[in-house]
Image: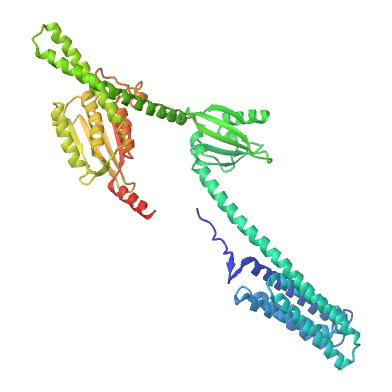
Amino acid sequence: MSGPRPELPYTAGRPVSVWTSLHYFNIYRLIVASVFLLAVAFYPRTSGLGSQSLPLFVWTSLAYWLLAIFFYGALKRLRIAFNRLLSLQVAADILAITLMMYASGGEKSGLAVMLLVVLAGAGLVGQGRLALFYAASATVAVLFEQTWRFLNFGADLADFVQAGILCIGFFATAISARLLARRVIANEELARQRGIDLANQLSVSERVIRDMQDGVMVVAPDETVRQWNPQAEMLLGVRAPARPDLASFSVALANLYRSYRKGAREQLASLRVAGSGALLRARFVHAGESGDVLIYLEDMGRIQQQAQQIKLAALGRLTANIAHEIRNPLSAISHAAELLREEKRTEGQVRLSRIINDNAQRLERLVRDVLELGRRDRTAQEPIRLTGFLESFLDELAMREEADRGVFALRADADATLFFDRTHLNQVLWNLLSNALRYCSRMPGAVRIEVRESIPSERVELHIIDDGAGVDEETRGKIFEPFFTTHGKGTGLGLYIARELCEANDASLDWAGNEPGAHFRIVGRNQRWQEDRNEENDQD
């Protein structure tokens, strides 16, 4: 995601908020200087300003106004040390106000109050011990002004008492402003830290919700959908408009929501997606006092598939144990049947011994498949160059199945590499190609093996296509189920074990359609992907 670059929290060693406060302080100075200048320009006699020395007041006001403009305009460019800049501005304030106070008749003019405002602002903006220094500077300036007035105009000594009280007010204002500033700094830092924590928490929550397998929606009382994750769109099979309501996602879900609002308690309901026919479970939960409602959407097909996988895993462990137990007596039966065939018996006894032997071999294959299924997690993956591997494999398969080698047509890149367990790949291909050979026409090129490598995605696709009748519509959804077979002598575990072995090697096996015969596809990773993953693990 892209957006405007966030403003740095610190500038020239100080928080941005402090520089902002100084900016407002400059605006205040510019306004005050402008008021003084306008007052003497339009009301020189009635305002009382400059009553003792109008020219001094006018020139001081003009200089103060020019300094205010300079400080305001140069603040963004004059990034010197903050305390030095603030001290320069406060010194200009104290000097200008003291001169204007002297030109207007002393502290009786009321201008001394402006020094209190300057000290309070400097204490809040500066937020340090310099506030006491500013108070001391203002005190020295006021006392110097009062002394100069006493020496030149013979002012009353009682004016020194008023000046002393005013100076005490300077220090009281500076100390109060400093204490208040410390509290403001603490609260600002706490708010900033909590803002960072909240932003991090929101980011984590958004990432978790976005990556959830379940759909999540936040719906307002007027059925406006405030938020939703991509999984909700995928489960409902829609792409939401810019300002969506719940009915634009699903009319059935909107009806369930209305029923929930009437009941006003947590509710579970099922709905069928109109387009795909998928079965979903919706759970409604109040989101708080705002009246919003959280809707969780769960894919019942995925839940049932997980339950089936758990059941099959338990069944696999059980059947593996049973297979171990029946293998020894099965071997004895097979051996006895072989001995019976060697003896000179009647034709009926030979036929019976052949039946015993055939069924014993079938049970042996079933036991072998079940035991092999239990070893799916024990993989030794390695890079396999498919061209040489498939050539050798097809020669062996043709010899074992007593088929013409020309039945198989291989098309593969010379450098195509699949990262797979060699033994597992041999078993997967044996199951797929044996089935293809069984149902094909056995004409030259009846079974096509194509290897397609995609460099950008680092995937390798292995396609096996025959020219037989293909998979009929009734059995398409069952071909990968265990113990399902259409062959009289099959065990029904071939395709199921092939898919399990592919998943154990970070690959997938699926039926890709009829062309016109069955088309199966193995999608795995090449060596480059494995090298990249090893580099990531090393970096971690």
Q: Name which residue lies at 49% across and 34% down.
A: 235
Residue 455 location in percent, x, y? 30, 48
Judge by depth and name the residue closer to the eye, 19 or 131. Answer: 131
- Left or right placement of residue 177 versus residue 439 in this view: right
- Position of residue 248 relative to residue 95, above or below, is above
Q: What is the residue that sits farthest to the left in this orientation?
A: 344
Task: Specify the quadrant of the image occupied by residue 264.
Answer: top right
The image quarter containing residue 318 is top left
Q: Is residue 504 left or right of residue 279?
A: left
Whole-percent x, y for residue 446 in the image:
20, 29
Give the residue drawn at x 79%, y 73%.
Answer: 172
Residue at x-position 54% and y-position 27%? 271
Instruction: Name the outermost residue toward the bottom.
Output: 152
Q: Is residue 48 visible?
A: no
User: Is 96 or 134 nearer to us in this picture?
Assistant: 134
Q: Is residue 399 visible?
A: yes
Q: Quadrant of residue 402?
A: top left
Q: Looking at the image, how many numbered discs can be counted on the residues?
A: 0
Residue that appears at 24% across and 37% down: 450
Measured as percent of width and height from the top left, residue 48 is found at 88, 81
Return the residue nearer the eye: 250 or 459: 459
- State how the image is colored: rainbow
Please provide percent x and percent y for residue 27. Answer: 71, 71
